[in-house]
Image (tube, rainbow, N blue to C red):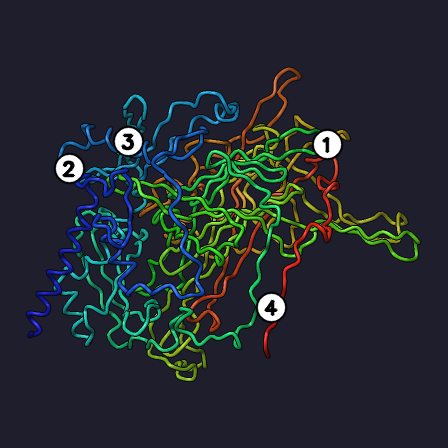
Amino acid sequence: MDQKSFLRLIFLIVTAGFILSFTSTYFSHAPSSTTGILDCTDSSSSPLCASRNFLFNKQQPRPIPKHDPKPKTKNHDHFSDTPNHPLDPLTVVEINKVRSILNTHALFTSGTPHALHTVVLEEPDKNLVRHWEKGNPLPPRKASVIARVGPDTHVLTVDISTGRVDSENSPVSVSGYPMMTIEEMNAMTVVPFANADFNRTIISRGINLTDVICFPISSGWFGNKEENARVIKSQCFLTQGTPNFYMRPIEGLTILVDLDTKQVIEISDTGRAIPIPGSTNTDYRFEKLVTTDKTRLLNPISIEQPRGPSFVIEDNHLVKWANWEFHLKPDPRAGVVISRVRVHDPDTQETREVMYKGFVSELFVPYMDPSDAWYFKTYMDAGEYGFGLQAMPLVPLNDCPRNAAYMDGVFAAADGTPFVRENMVCIFESYAGDIGWRHSESPITGIPIREVRPKVTLVVRMAASVGNYDYIIDYEFQTDGLIKAKVGLSGILMVKGTTYQNKNQVEKDREGNEEELHGTLLSENVIGVIHDHYVTFYLDLDVDGPDNSFVKVNLKRQETEPGESPRKSYLKAVRNIAKTEKDGQIKLSLYDPSEFHVINSGKTTRVGNPTGYKVVPRTTAASLLDHDDPPQKRGAFTNNQIWVTPYNKSEQWAGGLFTYQSHGDDTLAVWSERDRDIENKDIVVWYIENKDIVVWYTLGFHHIPCQEDFPIMPTVSSSFDLKPVNFFERNPILRAAPNFEHDLPVCGVQSVSA
């Protein structure tokens, strides 16, 4: 076969895949199973699955080696699910009902191309949810739908019972577009191959088209080409010799594509002189690495629970453990949403409110290379890609321990067909040998006391693979009332090809300064580019109810008066209640030590302290980008580490409801500049002006890549805490029991030969 015939054949094959992917953005095909659930097995003929498998299964799937855990059986019948709580996510039946209602709506029967970008529960009003009790009728079930019809975006509310469809600000006039659908992302992997100029570019490099994979990259917003079209960029990699294609970039080759027409607008090729890095030492799969029992660093470890787990999951979404209870649901944008968080008070025997709702609102990942092929890499992983849509099934025994329970996500495809993301969330009890509290009395007192209590926690976990990067999100509940939110970063670096194979080749100027690489040389011809990660959490704390205030407690140095004390100085706590939003804009500083309390002044302890919780920052990072830099305008919610806003149901996404190509005109920073009142205060003796506030916390990472990050990164983590402060009358785990030998099984130890 000559080259011309070969190219024609490739073009026809790929175009067929493209057509399948393109049709998946319409309501033109029926559900692929009799239950109405899209089942994306390898044998599925669904367009969604066909396009997905092109991207994720281009490499031959590896057989499951004998050391792997057995895949979990599909034992949950989602078709029979019914909602039991006002915040339960839409069920398969409800999503199918929404699809049927919209199929007959005038907006979708005109023949204009359309797709559903979001189909989630329209949550009832907060006060209604707070006062709902089990056994009461559920509020009317409604769906919130964001749809693209032709060039317009529409926000719709669908009443599932009545079939009524209400339109809110439709078509939308603000900047930005809704998050991409999975079908669109997958279509972008094949669109370049339908372009003859692109194919010629690849062939001219001496590369086989069948060895190339192209990956969709959100374009950000910089004006010009992004102004009047919904566009995306695509960059390509060589898959030959390794499944870790990210380490083999075709540097400088960038394809600009119109997301709506799926046509190539422009091809930029600035890296022809840069070689494609080799595949040596890039594979990270267990069966491809030389590993034996003799080279194994650790013996297997497992936590056993002879009496079974201490937590239960009622009605699919209500988690109860120790003194905690909360509602848990997967979400296509946020990943996991934790709601109605309440804790049992051992002294008063009351179950008290702590947080109405908490979730990851946005992730901002700017790369620090201003060159033509890199300047636009400033991702918003939730608002552009869907953090929950990118969640992958968790791997038993490795992502989660043996004692874990799992929860599936049920989402809607672009045509409204429900599909299931299996094992998306896991819940498990964790004991790492940590100590809840302890005290041993010194022998000099003559009092023989040695009291220790183990710390066991409950962990809610999800992991999202957003392209090359993997994020692990943990919400960890402690029996002492503390909630820890933890973010782990792993996966594969986004790397840049280079002509350099060794640091000694890097050019220097006359002053001896090295050429700016914008990163670290990790391997031959591979540069790991410097970048940041910012994860912004939405925290609607309701400490003993929604009427809360935000208090900044500053530690200040106080000088002593002459003759007052042998000491010259000491620290004192100065409390300042935030009156307006600008008072709640906090930049963390080691030289301005502070605590950040959310208090309920209407409820006090027996000695008069207002009950509260505090946000406790751990290691974090702040953005150093210019505030007028286009990416930072869109990511202005990272200008502070803490924000406090009045509760507003429409303000939940820090980057704005429509993040894709937004101009930064509808972000948390813009809302906060209104400087609204956030103080809960007594106006007169008989009247209290109530304020329901939301705290936003941004966890940041600066990442200067190093060779240990190649070819796959060890997990790096950071966290923050929500900790009770004068919430309980005393230590709430005072009565916790120690471990006793008779409570624990004695497992035999297998002898290991040297």
Marks 3 and 2, Cα distance to the nearest angstrom?
19 Å
Task: Point out the image quarter for the C terminus.
Answer: bottom right
Q: Which residue is drawn at 43% across and 40% down?
A: 670
Pointer 3 local density, CA inside 10 Å: few below 14, some 14–19, many at least 20: many
Marks 1 and 3, Cα distance to the nearest angstrom?
47 Å
The residue beneath circle 4 is: 750
Task: Point out the image quarter for the N terminus.
Answer: bottom left
- Residue 225 visible within the image: no
Amino acid, disc 2: Thr
The residue beneath circle 2 is: 112
Marks 4 and 3, Cα distance to the nearest angstrom?
56 Å
- Quadrant of residue 177 within the rendered picture: top left
| Mark carried by residue 279 | none
The residue beneath circle 1 is: 347
Q: Earlier in the sequence, mark 4 or mark 3?
A: 3
Q: Which residue is drawn at 33% across and 63% down?
A: 374
User: Residue 23, position in %: x, y?
Assistant: 17, 46
Front: mark 1 or 4? 4
Q: Is residue 564 left or right of residue 572?
A: right
Front one among 152 and 555:
152
Amino acid, disc 3: Val
- Quadrant of residue 246 within the rendered picture: bottom left
User: Residue 582, position in %: x, y?
Assistant: 53, 39
Q: Earlier in the sequence, mark 2 or mark 1?
A: 2
Q: In this view, does 338 lie to the left or right of 437?
A: left
Q: Is residue 159 left or right of residue 447?
A: left
Secondary structure, mark 3, is: helix
* Labels 2 & 4 near each other (Cβ < 8 A): no
